[in-house]
Image: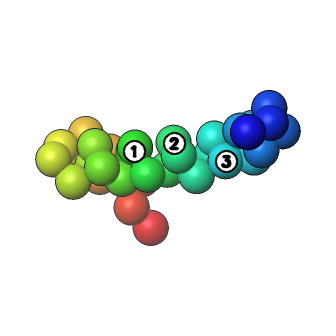
Amino acid sequence: LSFRMLRVAMPFVMLCVIQRFCDVSDVCFWLEP
């Protein structure tokens, strides 16, 4: 696993984490399109 791959994958990981968090919270309802 290279740092470049990690840097490319990080946005997708963050999206997954945010989506996971939004499933149980109304705090980021504004992130929904």
> Residue 2 location, x and y as percent?
80, 36
Q: Residue furthest right?
A: 4
> Residue 3 location, x and y as percent?
80, 32
How many C-alpha atoms fall within 10 Å of the one at disc 1: few (<14), some, or many (≥20)? few
Residue occupying the point 53% across, 46% down: 13
Q: Judge whether residue 30 can be spotted in this image.
A: no
- Side of 24 where 1 appears, left or right: right
In the image, 26 versus 11, the foreground residue is 11
3 or 2: tag closer to the N-terminus? 3
Residue occupying the point 63% across, 41% down: 10
Give how far apart the Cα atoms at labels 3 and 2 are: 9 Å
Q: Quadrant of residue 25?
A: top left
- Side of 7 where 26 appears, left or right: left
- Side of 6 where 2 appears, left or right: right
Q: Quadrant of residue 23?
A: bottom left
What residue is shown with label 3? Answer: 9
- Disc 2, disc 1: CB below 8 Å? yes
Q: Judge whether residue 22 can be spotted in this image.
A: yes
How many C-alpha atoms fall within 10 Å of the one at disc 3: few (<14), some, or many (≥20)? few
Give how far apart the Cα atoms at labels 3 and 1 are: 14 Å
Name the amino acid, label 3: Ala
What residue is shown with label 1? Answer: 18
Tag shown at residue 14? 2
Mark 3 lies on a secondary structure that is helix
> Residue 24 location, x and y as percent?
15, 47
Mark 2 lies on a secondary structure that is helix
Name the amino acid, label 2: Met
Tell which tag, 3 or 1, sits nearer the viewer: 3
Q: Is residue 2 above or below residue 9?
A: above
